[in-house]
Image (tube, rainbow, N blue to C red):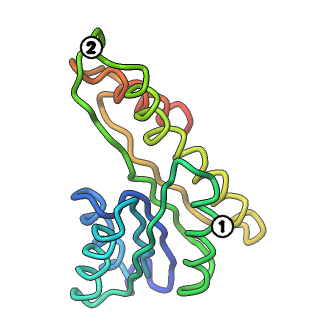
Amino acid sequence: MNLLEGKTVAMTGGGGGLGRCYGLAMAKAGAAVAVSDINLGAAQATAEAIIKAGGRAIAVQADVTQAAAFEQLFDRTKAEFGPLDVLLNIAGMFPRVPLVEMTEETWDAVITLNLKSVFLGARAAIRRMLPRKRGIVLSTASGTGIRGQPKGSAYSASKAGIIGFT
């Protein structure tokens, strides 16, 4: 029996390379996967790869910097596959910019996508998981959240935040 047989996974950032790898691994372990990304075409490509490999998947466009996007993602996931068992937070960005050249807008965009989305997703997922008394929230962090990264202060700060939040 596969570890995730009969389980439902919703993932953010599923259209990227890391998202595709995680989505395929979750499906290979037996899960049905709702692949979300702000880029619907990228989410669809990952969902199609999962289906081609024999798994079950749907693609959902979602701007995970907005709380309502998680409600829509989880509602669609439940309608297609059943109640949410796992949230996989992968969405993120890493602009490689020296601190002295970084704009406030870039800082805010990184912190909002990389860190705030983890808070929004975890809060929405746990609210749905508590009545069932089960569920898992996984969030990707990075070693740069501990040691920092030249030209990556916002990214490192966001990943440190994920580590502390988790």
Given the image, on which type of amino acid does mark 1 rest? Answer: Arg
Residue at 51% x, 62% y: name it.
Answer: 87
In the rendered image, residue 139, in percent from the top left (x then y), is placed at 45, 49
Q: Nearer the viewer, residue 79 or 4?
A: 79
- Looking at the rendered structure, the secondary structure element under dot 1 is loop
Q: Are marks 2 and 1 in contact (CB under 8 Å)?
A: no
Which mark is on residue 101?
2
Q: How crowded is mark 1: few (under 14 residues within 10 Å), some or many (20 or more)?
A: few
In the rendered image, residue 103, in percent from the top left (x then y), is placed at 36, 19
Q: Write down the residue under mark 1.
A: 134
Instruction: Specify the quadrant of the image occupied by residue 80.
Output: bottom right
Camera-near label (2 vs 1) is 2
Given the image, on which type of amino acid does mark 2 rest? Answer: Glu
Q: Which of marks 2 and 1 is nearer the N terminus?
A: 2
- Looking at the rendered structure, the secondary structure element under dot 2 is helix
Which mark is on residue 143?
none
Whole-number angstrom distance, CA of label 2 to CA of label 1: 45 Å
